Image (cartoon, grey):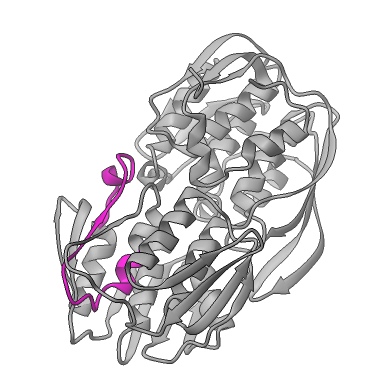
Amino acid sequence: MRNIFKITKKIEPFKKNIYIDGDKSLSIRWALIASQAIGKSRSYNLLKSEDVINTLNCLKQLGIKVKLTKKYCEIIGRGLNGFKYKKNLILDAGNSGTLGRLILGLLIHAKTKIKIKGDKSLSKRDFSRVTEPLRKFGANFKSHSGKLPILINGTNFARPIKYHEKKGSAQCKSSVMLAALNTKGTTIIKAKKSRNHTELLLKFLGLPITVSKNKKYDLIKVKGLKKIKSFNYSIPSDISSGSFFLVLTALSKKSELTIKNMNINPSRVGILKIFKLMGIKIKIKNSKIYNGEKIGDVSIESCKNIKAINCPKTLNSYAIDEFLLIFLLAAKAKGISYFKDLSELNQKESPRLIWGSKILNKIGIKNILNKDSIKIFGNPNLSLNKKIIIKDYLKDHRVFMTSVIAALTFGGRWMISDKDSINTSFPSFIKILKSFDANIN
């Protein structure tokens, strides 16, 4: 029973300034690209979650020297195509789709067969979306229905490709971009708009990448086999992690919060735009560009009157990890909220669109769930006084943390299983909650 989280009391009003752990997406990308640089690279505020630690362990198995201290992480890269390949090598991506998909892009020259595996949740997710374009470079793959485990066997004659990414998946286009770095010639990617951390990091490093934008797609060109110099990088705070505390504040009484130095990359701030549409006040101060990424201090206040919305689907890819939290806001809104074209949510650690509906059902909020959409009938007077159990959700860290926020703001007696799931992305979640004097066991 030690892995059960119990909450029986709403959080009291608070006024806080906090710092959040480093961005997970950037932490993983920094490590993978540093492995392709020549010499010693260091990162500061690297997220020390299971996903990032698994990334470092995979790089060690590929012959990359890694040093992790309390202050920094150091990687000694061996240059492009510099991995050492042992026979019968197995790389464990754990729960991380970012690691599992992106590292395949760096393995297109693998000289021996390498097996990529993951945990139960990751093994249910579709990897054909990256293996199909990577085959065009010349790499070979074996899998069962495009799922993990996957065997990859590289090529000595990688060739640039043209690739149309239609799903709005930053992982897919990033995997192709990393493969392109190791390929002679120019790879051209027409990509549906999604997070652009990889593009910004490659530009920050001065690599030959160009991005032309139109309303629906970005046209990305990457010229490969250009030397990457070692580099130092300080990771900004993760907006996906910070969003749990932003929503906690919006749904709590007489509370205020500021999160310092948060990543407010325009491709990640969909939730901030949705806040404004729902009438929730958000202020950004001290914004600046740091190493290609936009950062700033984000402040929010409690909101008494949350507005229902018909969410623009153009915001979907910019808020894809935050929709479970957004559904909680819709639960407390006045009126009916509608969210559509969200099939990508079910390609995450758990089928999150389905789980969003399950949580709403448990708290007594009427909703209509379809294949890729959900209607939520809000109740501004929502207040719970019943027992709610959350379990069997494939240990999805975001389901766990969303349930905790619901318990602290809506009331009731909650028992939420698998609290260790937070180690995947946000190990300090509970520690920060305790600094709010939240009544949790």
- Residue at the image position 55 percent from the left and 77 percent from the top: 41
Q: Nearer the viewer, residue 31 or 203?
A: 31
- Residue at the image position 43 percent from the left and 75 percent from the top: 35
Query: Does residue 234 sit above or below 111 in this rendering?
Result: above
Queried whether the magenta region covers residue 337, the answer comes back as no
Queried whether the magenta region covers residue 105, the answer comes back as yes
Locate residue 20 relative to residue 181 in the image: left or right: right
Figure quadrant of residue 152:
bottom left
Residue 285 at x, y percent in the picture: 83, 60
Query: Does residue 385 sit above or below 326 in this rendering?
Result: above
Query: Does residue 417 sit above or below 126 in this rendering?
Result: above
Q: Which of 406 and 424 is in front in this view?
A: 424
Locate residue 363 relative to residue 379 in the image: left or right: left
Inspect this view and state whether residue 380 appears: yes
Numbered range of the magenta stretch: 102-127
- Residue at the image position 63 percent from the left and 30 percent from the top: 405
Locate residue 426 relative to residue 353 in the image: left or right: right
Query: Does residue 381 sit above or below 184 in this rendering?
Result: above
Figure quadrant of residue 236:
bottom right
Inspect this view and state whether residue 247 appears: no
Count of all numbered marks drawn on residues in the image: 0
Residue 319 at x, y percent in the picture: 55, 50
- Residue at the image position 37 percent from the left and 41 percent from the top: 346
Which image quadrant: the C terminus? top right
Residue 353 at x, y percent in the picture: 43, 36
Residue 201 at x, y percent in the picture: 54, 75
